Structures are given as C-alpha cells and as structure tokens.
Image (cartoon, rainbow, N blue to C red):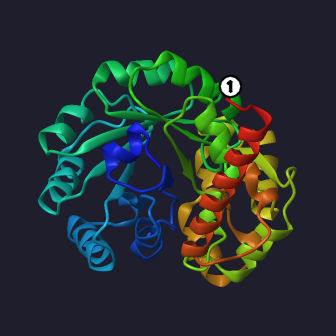
Amino acid sequence: MKTRITEMLGITFPIIQGGMQYVSYPELAAAVSNSGGMGTINATLYSSGEEFKDAIRKMKSLTDKPFCVNMSLLPDVKVGDELRYYIHICAMEGVKVIETAGTKPDKLTPLIHDAGILHIHKVPATRYGLSAEKCGVDAVTAVGYECGGHPGMDGIGTMVLANEASRSLKIPVIAGGGIVDGRGIVAALALGAEAVIMGTRFLASQEAPVSENHKQWLLEATEKSTVLIQKSIRNMMRAADNQAARECLRLEEKGASLEELMTVISGKRGRDAYASGWVDSGIFPVGTGCSLIKEIKPVEDIMRELVQEMEETTERLGKILPL
C-alpha cells in the first residue's frame, strides 16, 4: 500500500497508533511498528529526560522499524528548555517523527526540522491545519468529533473534516476519530486522507497496558457509551460514560473550580484505575468507535485483520464501481 504518508514515514500500511496517555508505552508502540504500521510513544509519560531517553532506547530494542514520539502540549505553552532537550534526545536517538498538538507549531517546527525529524501536527479543524501548513509542518492529523481524548469544540465529525482538510491542504492529511476497522480506513482514504490514526482500537489489544476490566468495558460498549466532559475548563474530552465522568459532569454543572475538578480528572487517578481494574474510579478516554470492537487480540492480529478488511472492502467497491 502506497500513499504519501507510507512513503514519507517508511511504513508498510497507512495506520498510525495514537499517543494515548498512560497507554502509549514502548511495548504497544513497538508491536504496531513491527506489524507494518507506525507506533507512537508519549513523551509526557516520562518525568525526566533520562527516563524519556531510556524509553526511546527500549523502543529501539523492541523494533528496528520507524516510530513516532507524541509531544502534546497545553494551549499557549511556551517552548522551553525541557522541550528543546526532549527534541534533542529524539535527534540523538534517531527518532523519525514527532507529533505535536495543543499549541500553534510555529516555534516547534524549526526546532524539529533542524533536528532532522519529520513534524506532524494534530488539529481538530481545517483552519488549524492550514495554519500548521503555513508553519511548515510535514503533515497534519485531522481528528474528528468521534475521537477519544480531546476533540475540537466545533463538533466537526471525521467524515466532513477528513474530506475538507484533504481538499484544502497541500500537505498529506492523516484522518482520525471513530476509525477502528478496515472499512473506516478505506473510507478515510476515499475522502482524501493519506493514512489514519487509531487509538481506541489499540486499547483493545493484548499489549495495551490497561486492565482486563477496561478492555471488557470496550467489548460491551455501544455507540452511546461515551460522554463529553471538561467543557467548563475549555479542555473538552470524550471519555467512557462511567462513574468518574458522571461525577465530573456533576461538578461542572455546579460551577466547580479546576482544583475541584482535578480530584476526579487527574491523570494519576486514571492511571491508578488502569492498574487496579476499577473502571469507574478514573477518567477513561475512548472514542465512539468502541461500539465496533468485538474482540481483544494481539496487535499483530489486529493489524492483519485491518489490512484484510481493507482489501475486502476495496474489492467490494470495485464490483460496485467497475472502471
């Protein structure tokens, strides 16, 4: 399979694993890279440059394939010495791609390119993609309203966003949000995207470092099993409709402060929930595509199934629309 993204990144299939908080560690990311996609590790999981360097080296010990580092930032966070150091580590360790999100990439792109690294920037709307393109990024990830984690406040679905962004931008577009199977990948490619990014599907893998209870929740979920929280602090998140999310919504309705909300939405609480298996005790970011997941499998099997369904879907379309 050849697209501008597969050729740019040196991967076999146009499938990228998302940089999920407390999930995107080397074991999961390496499994995706080894299966022909691009795995991603999340830099924010590491509290120091040395820990981050060790994670990259562990990743390199598990795969000789290309991989990505996610460096998502809060909006308006300044580019400081710590971030520069992390980019320097990526350069020294031969990281091929850095993905950023959350802030305008104008200060980041020169640093990343000077380090000899490709720069992908994640956006929730085409206008931000056009801005990122002007900043010189190599590709844009356009993530629709269905995604787990942080969708855009505009509420633009993947079907429209992928279509619009790929028509408007000259650089390659990677589509995300609600894509968990081969049919979804083919649809994204048909809309003009050059690859897809998938998070929720890889949560339901044997390699994902979340509890079996969280994985079972995914298998039982429907398309109505997620809710949007954190609107009051303008950091909206799509997450599982569990006790923690409902408590967050209750606090928001009361006008709770960020400090009060943090007692429910803190990353530590979510991480502890992944370890304990108590799904209701922490926020569980997950996309609406969870309703389409029916089985927990090794990443290698998931990738094989995705590619097979892509081929079957393309063959079916060929019969419907013969050349």
Q: Residues within 10 Å of mark 1 (few under 14, many from 20)?
A: few
- Seen at 63% across and 33% down, the residue is 190
**x 76%, y 73%: residue:** 295
Q: Is residue 20 left or right of residue 260?
A: left
Image quarter of residue 309 = bottom right
Give coordinates of residue 236: x percent, y percent.
64, 40
Residue type at the position of mark 1:
Val
Rendering coords of residue 127 (x, y %)? 50, 17
Q: Residue at x 38, y 25 (%)?
A: 132
Q: Nearer the viewer, residue 138 or 52?
A: 138
The answer to whether any part of residue 281 appears in the image is yes
Identified at 36% across, 22% down, the residue is: 133
- The mark total stands at 1
Q: Is residue 38 left or right of residue 310?
A: left
Q: Let me know if residue 180 appears in the view.
A: no
Residue 161 falls in which quadrant of the image?
Answer: top right
- Residue 199: horizontal and vertical position, in percent? 59, 56
Q: Secondary structure at mark 1?
A: helix
Q: Is residue 160 shown above or below 256?
A: above
Q: Quadrant of residue 143?
A: top right
Measured along the vertical axis of the image, is residue 69 above or below residue 106? below
Residue linked to disc 1: 160
Q: Nearer the viewer, residue 302 or 277?
A: 302
Image quarter of the C terminus: top right
